[in-house]
Image: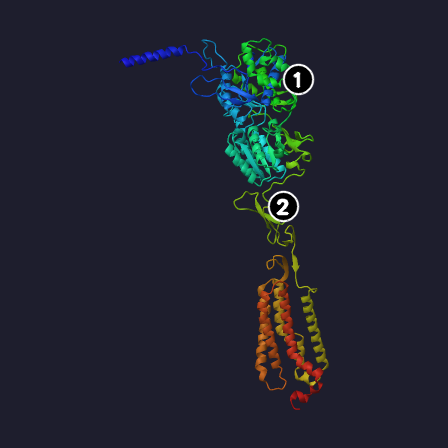
């Protein structure tokens, strides 16, 4: 029971204390490095120093405030530009005539821990009055920063719940374009989506199909490289290796350097922040790795920190995309005088202990008081200028400012209202650039293409050699003046970076197993196939009547082959044909002149003449043959046929039968007559007569049948024009067989042995 009562009393005590709970800062407040009061306050987190000195955490005493050193000149110029722009706006009688803008600028020292501390200080304010309760309102209306993408991601996630707009001048990570996760983030610089695409385009433009890739292992490098790799895959560019590291990972850096050293790619795309690029440059210089054509990004390609005595030996001839350089009138003079007189905390004349303590925080900045030679090279300063003016124009619309009436100062402006107003800003700054935010919260991509070149005095310059402007039509966005480029190693000729050399015409690409598609062998096209362009993936089959030439790069008409009179074989066959005709006529004339001689009479001159005049001895049999031929020629006559199957490289012009049945009938009928003639002659071989014709007819028919039986396989197996030659040879052979076997003995007696051309000799009664 006592425990229950004690518990009730405890809850009552806690409830009473909660009703009077006030906001208190745990620990010492963090004060901004630069600040000014105003009706509206713009915050900023910039890496004014680059090194952070950490106090020891021994938990024996209260930790001291973080200490920063090593001035970062670029971000210090961003501070000066922000204050310069705010001073301009406060003096402008049209933009915000009766509303003053203040600022609170914190130094992140390039540290995530210091950045988080600065973020909390911006949202909460430096201190609370005693008894002040939490009202849930932010003391600032917008934050400019941070310089790096990863830091901006952390900042926006912290401020996102409070809908405080974050406007970065140099955070380019494509991840920040996701409005679902970063609805309050805006950028006066383009997303890396465009830069990554532009990197792929420049690689393709110069014909480099084999590249290496290295990136920072953070949001900036990982997202940017992922887009680049996707585009290269679409464009047919092969990446030999893709490696990454963080600035603190020395072992990974060694692996990266070894990979670059062993690689065969002559072009390396370095999607790195300036910190990682400095580390990589040191290692490349130590290992004397030179001659690489490095393609860089805006984060380091024009960074002054990259210019060292040994850097040009490694990075000379590098190409990359840089933020467009814009000169803001009056700023160079402002950083020499007005800034130090009006905005620098140690500029007041009074000196006291607190002032002396303050001056110690700014001591290392004072060395820059009379220096402004770097101002023309500050490429991001104009982005800070645009960011401040974007906030001012959004406030102009929220306060309903009018030129002659001023602004309605009694309105309470919340940060989320500024977010909505920023989405609709559209104005032109005094440099002539138009400022507006797209649906992702970024501005249009406009880059200069710069080339690392060396002047005659040995100094390094970043010479513009082209530009990329995403606001132009696609065919006008990317322009390069290649004649002004100095390549790696001081060469005037563009380097080659390919895994395999181009395949010439007449060959095709064959991928090497287990390697990227850019690594291939050049295989000659097969017979009958061509490729008439370089780097052809496939060879093209020639049309039916065409064949590939010797170089396999052109289809030419196939050679038409047929038995011609001009061929040696054709000439020989024609000669023997004419010789046979002449011999036949000679025998016929001789027999006609000697028709009254015994040897002609004894051998039936009429039959001999009929035999001499052929397929005509028996009219009836001939009419049958004529009928078969006429029928064949009428129904399906023979026709010229281009045979493209027997030879690939040439056409055989041959006579197609038209009808196989008709052709078989003609040959069959001739064969039938030959067989009948042979049988009758064989049966008559024993007839009593000294000069019996049967034995000569039998022998001639044997030759005739033997020739035509042999003709069948020879005809089938003979290629091309030899088929016709075999057929002609068979006709000539059978004809000469008949002529020589039947008429040669008689011809011999009539001409050479006339004494035997008597009746007595013929009758065998000598």
Q: Tally the numbered discs.
A: 2
Secondary structure category for the residue under label 2: loop
Question: What residue is at 46 percent from the left and 21 percent from the top?
Answer: 56
Image position of 61 with respect to 700: above or below: above
Q: Residue furthest bottom?
A: 766
Which of the 4 image quadrants contains residue 426?
top right
Q: Position of residue 19 (x, y in %)?
A: 40, 10
Q: CA distance from mark 2 to mark 1?
A: 59 Å
Question: What residue is at 62 percent from the left and 39 percent from the top?
Answer: 207
Q: Quadrant of the N terminus?
A: top left
How crowded pointer 2 is (Cα within 10 Å; few <14, some 14-19, many 20+) is rated as some
- Find residue 333 and name its label: 1
- Find residue 593 and name its label: none
**Residue underneath mark 2:** 534
Left or right: 185, with 746 as reference point: left
How crowded pointer 1 is (Cα within 10 Å; few <14, some 14-19, many 20+) is rated as few
Q: Position of residue 121 (x, y in %)?
A: 50, 17
Whichever of callouts 2 and 1 sits on the residue coming sooner in the sequence is 1
Image position of 324 with respect to 335: above or below: below
Q: Residue furthest right?
A: 593
Secondary structure category for the residue under label 1: helix
């Amino acid at each position: 029971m006592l425990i229950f009562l004690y518990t009730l009393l405890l809850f009552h005590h806690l409830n009473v204390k909660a009703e009077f709970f006030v906001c208190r800062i745990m620990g010492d407040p963090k004060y901004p490095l630069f600040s000014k009061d105003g009706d509206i306050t713009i915050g900023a987190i910039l890496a004014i120093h680059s090194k952070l000195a950490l106090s020891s955490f021994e938990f024996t005493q209260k930790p001291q405030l973080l200490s920063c050193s090593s001035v970062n000149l670029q971000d210090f110029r961003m501070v000066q530009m922000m204050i310069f722009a705010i001073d301009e706006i406060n003096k402008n009688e049209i933009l915000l005539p009766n509303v003053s803008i203040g600022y609170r600028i914190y130094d992140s020292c390039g540290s995530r821990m210091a950045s988080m501390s600065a973020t909390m200080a911006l949202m909460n304010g430096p201190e609370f009055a005693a008894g002040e309760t939490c009202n849930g309102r932010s003391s600032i209306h917008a934050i400019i920063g941070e310089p790096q993408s990863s830091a901006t991601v952390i900042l926006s996630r912290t401020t996102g719940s409070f809908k405080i707009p974050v406007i970065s001048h140099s955070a380019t990570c494509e991840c920040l374009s996701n409005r679902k996760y970063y609805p309050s983030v805006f950028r006066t610089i383009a997303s890396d989506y465009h830069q990554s695409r532009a990197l792929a385009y420049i690689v393709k433009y110069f014909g480099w199909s084999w590249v290496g890739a290295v990136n920072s292992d953070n949001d900036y490098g990982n997202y940017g490289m992922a887009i680049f790799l996707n585009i290269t895959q679409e464009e047919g560019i092969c990446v030999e290796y893709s490696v990454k590291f963080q600035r603190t990972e020395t072992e990974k850096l060694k692996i990266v350097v070894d990979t670059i050293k062993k690689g065969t790619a002559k072009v390396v795309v370095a999607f790195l922040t300036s910190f990682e690029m400095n580390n990589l440059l040191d290692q490349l210089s130590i290992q004397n790795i030179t001659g690489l054509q490095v393609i860089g990004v805006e984060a380091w390609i024009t960074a002054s920190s990259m210019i060292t005595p040994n850097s040009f030996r490694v990075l000379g001839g590098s190409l990359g995309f840089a933020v467009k350089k814009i000169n803001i009138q009056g700023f160079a003079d402002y950083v020499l005088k007005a800034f130090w007189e009006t905005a620098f905390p140690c500029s007041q004349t009074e000196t006291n202990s607190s002032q002396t303590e303050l001056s110690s925080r700014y001591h290392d900045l004072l060395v820059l008081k009379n220096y402004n030679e770097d101002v023309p090279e500050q490429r991001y300063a104009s982005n800070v200028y645009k960011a401040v003016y974007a906030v001012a124009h959004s406030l102009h619309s929220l306060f309903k400012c009018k030129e002659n009436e001023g602004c309605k100062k009694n309105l309470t402006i919340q940060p989320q209202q500024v977010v909505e107003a920023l989405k609709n800003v559209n104005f032109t700054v005094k440099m002539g650039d138009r400022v507006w935010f797209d649906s992702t919260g970024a501005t249009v991509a406009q880059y200069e293409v710069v080339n690392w070149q060396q002047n005659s005095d040995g100094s390094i310059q970043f010479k513009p050699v082209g530009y990329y402007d995403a606001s132009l039509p696609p065919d006008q966005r990317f322009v390069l003046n290649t004649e002004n480029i100095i390549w790696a190693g001081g060469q005037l000729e563009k380097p080659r970076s390919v895994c395999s050399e181009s395949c010439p015409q007449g060959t095709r690409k064959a991928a090497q197993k287990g390697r990227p598609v850019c690594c291939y062998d050049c295989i000659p096209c097969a017979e009958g196939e061509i490729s008439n362009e370089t780097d052809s993936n496939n060879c093209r089959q020639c049309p039916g009547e065409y064949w590939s030439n010797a170089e396999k790069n052109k289809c030419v008409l196939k050679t038409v082959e047929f038995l011609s009179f001009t061929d040696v074989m054709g000439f020989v066959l024609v000669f023997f044909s004419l010789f046979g005709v002449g011999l036949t006529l000679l025998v016929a004339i001789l027999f006609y002149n000697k028709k009254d001689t015994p040897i002609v009479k004894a051998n039936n001159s009429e039959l001999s003449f009929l035999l001499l005049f052929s397929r005509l001895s028996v009219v009836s049999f001939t009419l049958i043959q004529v009928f078969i031929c006429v029928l064949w020629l009428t129904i399906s006559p023979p026709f010229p046929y281009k045979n493209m199957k027997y030879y690939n490289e040439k056409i055989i012009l041959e006579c197609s039968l038209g009808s196989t049945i008709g052709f078989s009938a003609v040959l069959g009928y001739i064969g039938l007559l030959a067989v009948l003639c042979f049988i009758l002659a064989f049966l008559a071989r024993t007839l009593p007569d000294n000069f019996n014709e049967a034995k000569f007819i039998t022998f001639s028919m044997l030759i005739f049948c033997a020739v035509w039986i042999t003709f069948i396989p020879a005809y089938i197996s003979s290629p091309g024009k030899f088929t016709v030659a075999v057929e002609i040879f068979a006709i000539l052979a059978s004809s000469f067989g008949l002529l020589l076997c039947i008429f040669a003995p008689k011809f011999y007696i009539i001409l050479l042995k006339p004494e035997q051309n008597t009746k007595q000799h013929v009758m065998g009664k000598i």
